[in-house]
Amino acid sequence: MCGIAGTIGSADTAVVTAMTAALRHRGPDGDGLHADPDGHFAFGHRRLAIIDLSAGGRQPMAWAEGRFWITYNGELYNYRDLRRDLEQAGCVFRTASDTEVVLAAYATWGDECLRRFRGMFALALADRARGEVLLARDRLGIKPLLYTVRPEGVLFASELRALRASGRIPDALDRQALWAYLSQGAIPQPSTILAAVRMLPPGALLRVGFDGRPRGEPRSWWDLAEAAAVLRPQLDGMGLEDAAAALRQRLEEATRCHLVADVPVGAFLSGGVDSAAIVALMRQVGGGPVRTFTVGFPATPGAYDERRAAAATAAALGTAHHAVVIEPADVGEAFEAVVDALDQPSLDGANTWFVSRAAAAHGKVALTGLGGDELFAGYPHFRRHQLADRLRRRLPVPGPLWSALRLLPERFRHNLMLPALNESERLATLRCRMGDRARRRALDDAFLEALTALPATPPMPGPQEAADRRWPDVVARLSAAEVRGYLVNTLLRDGDAMSMAHGLELRPILLDHEVVAFALALPSALKIRHGRGKAVFSAALADLLPPAVLSRPKRGFELPLHAWLAGPLRERAEAAF
């Protein structure tokens, strides 16, 4: 895990040095800079040493006598297997790093190497013979890669702050992104809060010529729906027991991959099933004790403190457990640091900042259970949407009545009136915190006028999953929408920003692409059974987790900010605004 930055179309080392310096927190173990001798590009790198801790793993790195250069952020979990294949093809390696394997793989297989990679990554790879730089991002968008096209060429980086440090990016906000943030609490990718900057989409690549001009638009090299569709015929008709066994096999293999490191690997542990499953799998596959981390807070009305549940799970699994208590005063003291770490506006992430700070005091890598609810229908709204779909299909309600119900206030439409909405409309309301009318009522005229004056980027597309018939039913389409939406835009983006603020690498085992494709190919009847979600996931782990853990209801983990802002943090918050 690292921080990367660079320019394409020029080799301005002063600019790249400034960008790289802004990413120091992402790579406290060293930095590197390479400027193309012909002035076509410059790459910067901040290193967090996890695989090959020697100087041999430093970046930017070259291959084939300087034809190829790379700056790379992430981990290639199957790099040892790929290295053996490449050695048989005649490649000779100088280091023990996964970075050199990425270079050799591209030199040998071209773009197709991306499909062979198992891991998380964002990279820029220059080919001096072809006169271009390849920008690429992992399948699920675990690692960020932002870029901007300017008159002098393309600039890219791991974070928005690095692009701003270049001094070449206009500060004009993106009208569509800001409006979407006010609704969803996050900025939908590929937009960013700045109109001039884009996020490379998950599973996409972009070629940029040495003239600094993109060669076309970003294109997908991996597709979520296609990956699931390939597996679906093999899984149709499969029973729960067989599906659970097949899932367990994939989970164990993913865990082996995610434990690859030359430094100790810990785990976040909440009171829920997903993180407990990850820790249990680590024990099962790795064999040794696991260091786990959780955060909690003093008793607060209406808030859920996970420390007791996490401690019970830790005791059952025999972990070396660390619990950190967050006091209101801690949040007040860290307020500026937390906001700064976000890099872009988000309503989430503060909890990850605190638990990452605790984990970073003991190591560089922590595994997480992100993705379990999205993949296996764990959220309550999966059952609500499924029921709404059945009601709309089966109840003999005249069309005009459905249309009339849709005119009800937004606060009713989200839950009670879901059957009144078609599937596209239901997906559009997913994660919606504030509808259009509510936003306009909440904002004063001056703000709305200023918003109208901002640059207008193309309107953001609505959920595409409802129209994508490659997904067989409403649960599958909802899963895909959650993966492409909330998971990517909020959980993964915030998780990366908040953990890397402390130089900590997060590895989400459940987002191994083999697990993701399998999960989204499973029949929905294996996920929701007897009114409960995650049935196949629980069955796959039944022998590893105590029954009390498996039966715990879904509880979201959030700091009790509403209570604190109305109480002990009120003066601090009012002073900030």
Image (cartoon, rainbow, N blue to C red):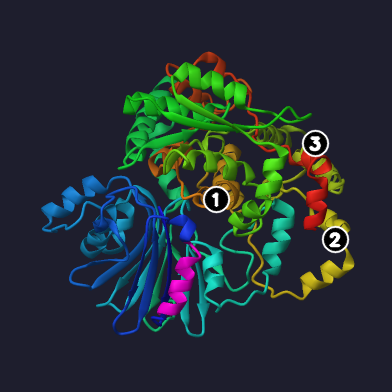
Residue 80: assigned label: none
Residue 228 at x, y percent in the picture: 44, 43
> SS for tag 3?
loop
The numbered mark, 1 or 3, whose residue comes first in the sequence reads 3
Which amino acid is tagged 2? Leu
Image marks 1 and 2: residues in contact by CB distance under 8 Å: no
Taking the image as shown, residue 176 lies to the left or right of residue 370, namely: right
* Residue 514 shown left or right of residue 64 in the figure: right
Q: Quadrant of residue 169?
A: bottom right
Drawn side of residue 555 relative to residue 319, left or right = right
Q: Earlier in the sequence, mark 3 or mark 2?
A: 3
User: Which element carries disc 1, helix, strand or loop?
Assistant: helix
Which image quadrant: the C terminus? bottom right
Residue in the foreground of this view, choosing between 347 and 417: 347
Q: Of the residues tagged 3 and 2, which is closer to the observer?
A: 2
Q: Are marks 1 and 3 in contact (CB under 8 Å)?
A: no
Which residue is under mark 2?
Answer: 443
Cα distance in 3D space between marks 3 and 2: 27 Å
Q: Which residues are magenta?
A: 13-23
Q: Amino acid at mark 1?
A: Val
How far across and down, in percent of the image, does residue 279 sit? 44, 28
Point 67% across, 28% down: residue: 305
Judge the density around disc 1: few (<14), some (14-19), many (≥20) Cα neighbours within 10 Å: many
Q: Is residue 16 shown in magenta?
A: yes
Q: How far, Cα to Cα, is label 1 from label 2?
A: 27 Å
For disc 1, the marked residue is 488
**Magenta segment includes 362:** no
Q: What residue is rendered at 45% in x and 39% in y?
A: 366
The residue labelled by disc 3 is 416
Instruction: Determine whether the residue tagged by mark 2 lies in a helix, strand or loop.
Output: loop
- Foreground residue, 145 or 502? 502
Q: Position of residue 364 (x, y in %)?
A: 41, 44
